[in-house]
Image (tube, rainbow, N blue to C red):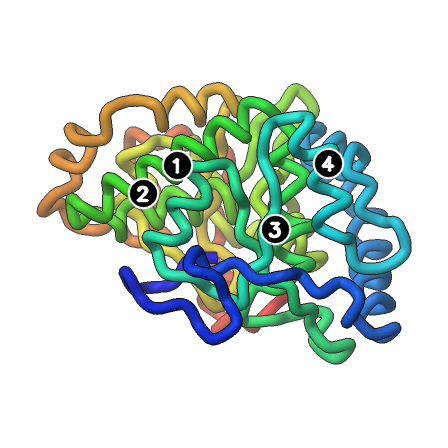
């Protein structure tokens, strides 16, 4: 939920930290029906696709109470489990605001929901992406610690001019990460778990590369913001992801400083390869999927 920018003034009606009231009572019957449609089709698909931590979080928060969740209600259980809470924001927020929220265990979520004719694709994250996609993982203590560490790392990255590298880490983990399990690869990234089509694409399609996660490698790899990914990075465990984040990033930034980007479809000799993709989807021009 971050956007380019630093120390921008919040929009009218927003507080100094860019938070707003969710305005749950203002949702229409159509809004609630849209949530229910999205929830039912995605929750029905995810067993066998999503990691156990996500599925446990989805159950713990009881996000299907008949319509759009009320942040005040879900925060009771979320805070009890990991000390996190969800706060409503009017849309994408400046980077410094975003990192401050994460560093203090607050997840900024958009409070609007897409229209019924936008079920399969929406350019700007809405409440379904933010709450259904992101929040269940925040019930897991290890992932919750990772997100806090990422927020604190983001504050440092802003001062070191390395935000573009750190943004790639977020994209390839929090948004589009895969997890290695004894049952096979599973999804945990919010951009995948909130998308019916990408849930299937990320695990089953022969097109993308699936490569073992390496911090420096990830920071040097561009990403697709407008279509399915050409590469997915696979973490061995949530603890391994947290451990990688808790190290001093100073030497990491020094290692990537001046280094050329790695082509998005490349496979390096040192990569741990789960799948060598055909890249057929990207070669055919792709298509927007939701």
Residue at the spot of label 1: 150
Residue 79 is situated, as x and y percent measured from the top left of the image, at 65, 32
The crowd level at tag 1 (other Cα within 10 Å; few <14, some 14-19, many 20+) is many
Among numbered discs 2 and 4, the one appearing first in the sequence: 4
**Which of the two marks, 2 or 3, is nearer to us in this view?**
2
CB within 8 Å, label 2 to label 1: yes
Callout 3: helix, strand or loop? helix
Residue at horizontal 63 percent and vertical 70 percent from the top = 121
Q: Is residue 220 visible?
A: yes
Distance of label 4 from label 1 (alpha carbons): 23 Å
Residue at the spot of label 3: 192
Label disc, if present, on residue 154 of the rendered structure: 2
The crowd level at tag 2 (other Cα within 10 Å; few <14, some 14-19, many 20+) is many
When asked about the image quadrant of residue 240, the answer is top left
Q: Is residue 83 above or below residue 110?
A: above
**Which of the two marks, 3 or 4, is nearer to us in this view?**
4
């Amino acid at each position: 939920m971050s956007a380019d920018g630093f120390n921008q003034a919040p929009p009218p009606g927003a507080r100094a930290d860019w938070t707003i009231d969710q305005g749950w009572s203002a949702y229409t019957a159509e809004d609630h029906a849209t949530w229910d449609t999205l929830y039912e089709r995605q929750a029905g698909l995810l067993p066998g696709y999503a990691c156990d931590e996500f599925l446990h979080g989805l159950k713990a928060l009881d996000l299907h109470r008949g319509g759009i969740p009320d942040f005040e209600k879900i925060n009771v259980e979320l805070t009890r489990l990991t000390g996190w809470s969800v706060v409503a924001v009017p849309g994408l927020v400046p980077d410094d605001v975003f990192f401050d929220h994460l560093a203090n265990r607050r997840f900024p979520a958009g409070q609007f929901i897409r229209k019924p004719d936008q079920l399969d694709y929406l350019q700007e994250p809405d409440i379904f992406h933010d709450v259904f996609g992101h929040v269940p993982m925040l019930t897991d203590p290890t992932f919750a610690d990772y997100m806090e560490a990422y927020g604190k790392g983001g504050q440092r990255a802003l001062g070191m001019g390395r935000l573009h590298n750190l943004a790639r880490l977020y994209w390839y983990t929090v948004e589009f990460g895969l997890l290695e399990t004894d049952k096979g690869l599973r999804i945990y990234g919010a951009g995948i778990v909130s998308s019916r089509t990408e849930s299937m694409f990320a695990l089953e399609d022969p097109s993308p590369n699936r490569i073992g996660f390496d911090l420096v490698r990830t920071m040097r790899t561009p990403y697709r913001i407008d279509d399915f990914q050409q590469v997915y990075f696979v973490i061995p465990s949530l603890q391994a992801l947290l451990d990688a984040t808790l190290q001093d990033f100073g030497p990491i930034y020094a290692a990537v400083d001046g280094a050329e980007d790695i082509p998005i479809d490349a496979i390096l000799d040192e990569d741990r390869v789960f799948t060598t993709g055909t890249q057929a989807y990207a070669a055919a021009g792709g298509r927007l999927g939701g």
